[in-house]
Image: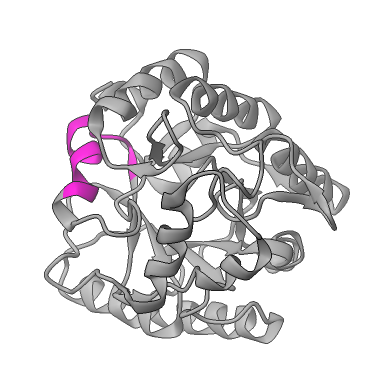
């Protein structure tokens, strides 16, 4: 693994996992996404990972028009690296998921490195009712759905946050490296705690790092993402081991035990405080661009 002399903080602003019933602080409208992204940047995030939601009821949407309502505002108010999802949300076709990124041409996109079960349905038991019917339908649908990302679906042409939900996803990435379809440095996001992927166990984190080192040597930057209550502990452990970190309301809606995060900046500020107490320096957006060899914010289409 390339030595992360400074730690890149990514903030995943809203995602497509959580729903409006779960927290009143989930960014839904373009205004809320733009404000949360700007706040996360001010708190120390160098990379902003972005999804879009229908402003009427908060459901995930792949509509490029919605993306374009907040992307220019983020570019105007921050110098952060914009990273747009290609994972989209439950039930979206591959073509739908790609519509926003293809129009916006950001510096980075996320790329899930394999098809998988993506079980959200256990969250149904935590809420007696939902504000919108789509929320319950959305969670229930994950019981009998496979998130599709086949070898044919995985394309290239931009810099990616390679999202690896299990050890096999690291080997999938190595396959594309061996074919010469992706070039270093690779930004490898190892993800823990999603039902259907590898569990949020500290030994799993060490194992994923060991395999990534074996496959990619010093040609990659490692980052850690852990779902829910595991967010801060695994991110802290990974950073101590030389990795970068990802937080945000996509991955957890909490700022502490039983305390909902009021915005994304609260989580960014918390992980930054932890890392700086450990004498780790936080990368600026300019430093993140250099570490990941990105094209620059002046080369995007928004």
Residue 191 spot, x, y in % from top left: 52, 68
Q: Quadrant of residue 89?
A: bottom left
Q: How many marks?
A: 0
Residue 68 spot, x, y in % from top left: 30, 23
Viewer-side residue, 3 vs 44 = 44
What colouring method underlies this structural image?
one colour
Residue plotted at (59% across, 28% down): 36
Q: Is residue 35 left or right of residue 218?
A: right
Residue 275 part of the magenta-drawn span: no
The magenta span reads 96-108
Residue plotted at (24% across, 47% down): 158
Looking at this rendering, what residue extends furthest in the top direction?
A: 76
Viewer-side residue, 201 vs 45 = 201
Q: Main structural element of the magenta stretch: helix, strand or loop?
A: helix
Residue plotted at (34% across, 59% down): 90
Residue 100 part of the magenta-drawn span: yes
Residue 297 spot, x, y in % from top left: 36, 26
Q: Quadrant of residue 62?
A: top left
Q: Indicate whether 39 appears above or below 25.
A: above
Residue 283 spot, x, y in % from top left: 62, 40
Q: Indicate whether 63 appears above or below 247.
A: above
Viewer-side residue, 107 vs 290 = 107
């Amino acid at each position: 693994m390339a030595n992360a002399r400074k730690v890149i903080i990514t903030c995943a602003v809203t995602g497509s996992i959580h729903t409006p019933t779960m927290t009143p602080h989930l960014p839904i409208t373009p205004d809320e996404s733009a404000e949360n992204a700007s706040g996360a940047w001010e708190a120390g995030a160098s990379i902003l990972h972005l999804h879009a939601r229908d402003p009427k009821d908060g459901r995930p949407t792949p509509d490029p028009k919605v993306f374009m309502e907040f992307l220019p505002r983020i570019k105007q108010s921050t110098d952060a690296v914009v990273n747009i999802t290609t994972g989209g949300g439950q039930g979206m076709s591959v073509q739908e998921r790609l519509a926003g990124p293809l129009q916006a041409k950001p510096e980075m996109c996320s790329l899930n490195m394999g098809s998988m079960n993506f079980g959200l349905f256990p969250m149904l038991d935590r809420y007696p009712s939902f504000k919108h019917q789509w929320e319950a339908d959305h969670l229930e649908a994950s019981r009998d759905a496979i998130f599709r990302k086949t070898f044919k679906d995985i394309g290239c042409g931009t810099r990616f946050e390679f999202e690896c939900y299990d050890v096999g996803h690291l080997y999938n990435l190595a396959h594309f490296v061996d074919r010469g379809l992706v070039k270093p440095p690779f930004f490898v996001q190892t993800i823990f705690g999603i039902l259907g992927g590898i569990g949020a166990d500290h030994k799993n984190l060490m194992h994923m790092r060991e395999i990534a080192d074996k496959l990619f040597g010093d040609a990659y930057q490692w980052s850690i993402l852990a779902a829910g209550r595991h967010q801060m502990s695994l991110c802290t452990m990974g950073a101590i081991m030389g990795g970068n970190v990802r937080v945000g309301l996509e991955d957890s809606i909490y700022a502490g035990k039983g305390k909902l995060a009021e915005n994304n900046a609260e989580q960014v500020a918390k992980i930054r405080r932890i890392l700086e107490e450990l004498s780790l320096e936080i990368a600026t957006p300019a430093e993140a661009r250099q570490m990941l060899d990105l094209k620059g914010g002046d080369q995007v289409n928004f």
